[in-house]
Amino acid sequence: MSKCPQCTKEISPMTEVCPVCKCNLKEYYSKKLEEIEWNLDLKRLYEEVIPPTEPHKEIPDLTKAILGVLVVFVLYIFINGFVTYGSINDTLLYAQKFIYAFGVGVLALLFSLRSNSTKYDEELLEYEMYQKRPEDYKIMKALEAYKLEQKYTTPTVQCPYCKSTNVVKITSAGRIVSVATIGLASGNMGKQWHCRDCKSNF
Ligand SMILES: [Zn+2]
Ligand SMILES: [Zn+2]
């Protein structure tokens, strides 16, 4: 699933208008494409987006392991439970063990199949989105990667004047825009950060 960029509710990547906040995703993506043109970091990530391959439903390794254990256990029960000419109580004990193991096995199996099919469904949705709207898919993936990159590479920076942490990085590409939008004079060209609170650059 993908998230609506405006209200962050989970929506299908196929949707063109968010059913929750009515945000027009088509307009949103075209605006973001303009941003990609001047944001060099975003542009690099956009160009690095790998097209998704068609997902395949496969038996997860966990399921294979559980099936293996079950087969061994069933064999053990059949050989021991029926070859041993013990009392009826012994056979009942084996039957009990078998039911417990089988129950646990089935639960694990269901859980594993469920998580595997959720992953498959998500991959299929993304694949279908790429088939229909490859451009939007690339923008979406680039934005996701950009957000992650910003989260892990941007340290918490404090404004030296008002001590606010509400600061934004002035990227080299963003500088061109910055001159008009945040009043970056030529004397400030070496400054890397802009404080959104006191509007100073440092
Ligand atoms: Zn929305
Ligand atoms: Zn400040």
Image (cartoon, helix red, strand yellow):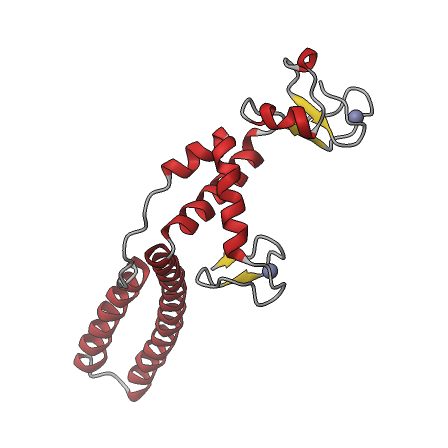
Vertical placement of residue 145 versus 155, above or below: below
Q: Residue furthest bottom?
A: 88
Image quarter for ligand 2: top right
Vertical placement of residue 153 versus 90, above or below: above
The residue depicted at 32 percent of the width and 50 percent of the height is 52
Q: Work out which quarter of the rendered image holds the C terminus and state it.
A: top right
Q: Quadrant of residue 61?
A: bottom left
Front one among 109 and 78: 109
Vertical placement of residue 31 versus 183, above or below: below
The residue depicted at 45 percent of the width and 34 percent of the height is 43
Q: Is residue 156 visible?
A: no
Q: Position of residue 9 (x, y in %)?
A: 59, 60
**Image side of residue 124 versus residue 9, left or right:** left
Q: Quadrant of residue 45?
A: top left
Q: Position of residue 103 (x, y in %)?
A: 38, 76
Q: Residue furthest top?
A: 187
Q: Position of residue 94 (x, y in %)?
A: 31, 79
Vertical placement of residue 188 versus 29, above or below: above
The residue depicted at 64 percent of the width and 20 percent of the height is 192
Q: Position of residue 135 (x, y in %)?
A: 39, 48
Q: Is residue 179 visible?
A: yes
